[in-house]
Image: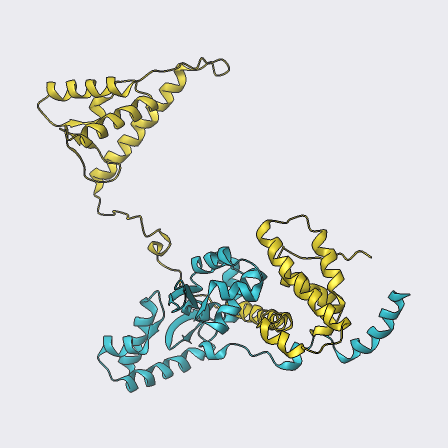
Amino acid sequence: MEDLLASIEALIFASDEPVSLEEISRALGVKFIAAREALDQLCTAYQDKKHGICLKEYNGRYIFVTKPEYASVIKEMHRKRITRLTPAALETLAIIAYKQPITRAEIEEIRGVKAEKTLLTLSKYGLIEEMGRKESIGNPIVYGTTEKFLQHFDLEDLSCLPEVLPEDLELVTAEEKEGDGEENQDQAE
Amino acid sequence: MAYELQLDSFQGPLEVLYQLVKKNRIEISELSLASIAEQYIDYMQRLKEFNLELASEFMLIATELMQLKLRTLLPREDKEEVEEEEGRNLVERLQEYHYFKKVSEVLMGYEERGSSYFQRALELEYFIDEELEINLEMDLSDLQEAYKQAMAAYSNRSMGEEETVDREWQEIKFEDIRIEDKISFIIEKISRSSAVLKFSDLLLDKSNRLEIVVTLLGVLELARLAKVSIKQEEVFSTISIK
């Protein structure tokens, strides 16, 4: 078991991309369940405070990342550039994430503006990808999000996308409504 | 009354309408949208950045707003009929727009959280354009050769500069290098030598850029006519001609 843990640790460490359970069990010639169990143990072991890194799972793939507590020291020493999306890019990405697979025309219908440039940027950063073509007139390309998207937003998988509750969608709070009536009257005068 | 909207970056007609809804602190409904139709049209008319494509988008929504406005003023008998015709109406579109605004706000927090995890620095190759290949199978002599070439190019360049010390007044000569002349020069040169020629052999000692280009064009033309064959082992390496 010790050996298996160490092998899995080495495998994941040496990989640039997150490694899947299938890849691990195939590479080490162990059963799926055994690999899964070892992974869980490894994950727990790294939660210990003596470790600065932890094992993260995105879409069933595993990767070693540094713990958030040490983000500030890493930024300090390595001058890591943090990429943040602009509001327009973020909104476009949100639409793709919730409605994938989706065509460019469908995105533009929701956003009310052209999306071509934004789609290019999002593709360049590997947050979205072409997922084939839609079977409709002109066979337009459909887009979807990537695993890098999950990692960028720290989502284990797409089912973890946030839900917006109806009450959060209220544009005007009850208090504002009351106060507003008078204000509007003032303006009218 | 003038309404100034502060938009970070121009985001199209739906954004304008959305900002107006927020500014007026109203709900998204047919009635409320009808009430801000004038504000929207007022904004639209004062918009400076207006290309044809956007103009049509803006007009489309303006038309829908006016329809809503009309409906609030006129008794509506055929209401249901009208709605079925339109498909997704403005209220639905704006509600969806609002939904994704809200979702983006939440996602922004997630992005913040995601950016506090760092993964191991990726290998250098990851950042190199896929079109480029780096040949690292070099030995010390290759390196030495590359150094010599670089230094030779450098000394050629600095010598060239000395010749034209007078930088303020420099005569720009019109150089007439004809490709026909170059081609006959190349043919002559090749026919006179039995060995394989290098591209650099075709150049005179003091060839300028134009002359190099014309010579290369000459070689390519000859190759096209199948008069010569050219070979280059790697990008930027010596071109052999025979």
Q: Is residue B43 above or below residue B79?
A: above
Q: Is residue A45 above or below residue B11?
A: below
Task: Return the x and y of residue B147 as percentages of the image width and height.
Answer: 28, 34
Task: Return the x and y of residue B82 as percentages of the image width and height.
Answer: 63, 74
A132 vs B13, left or right, is left
The answer to which of B94 and B8 lies nearer the viewer is: B94
Which residue is painted at 25% across and 47% down in the image? B135
B236 vs B169, left or right, is left
Task: Return the x and y of residue B81 as percentages of the image width and height.
Answer: 62, 77
Q: Which chain is yellow?
A: B
> Is any part of residue B18 visible from this angle?
no
Residue B10: quadrant of the picture: bottom right
Which residue is painted at 73% across and 64% down in the image? B37
Task: Return the x and y of residue A98 as percentages of the image width and height.
Answer: 50, 73
Rendering colour (chain A) = cyan
B217 vs B191, left or right, is right
> Is any part of residue B21 visible from this angle?
yes
Residue A151: quadrant of the picture: bottom left
Q: Is residue A129 above or below residue B222?
A: below
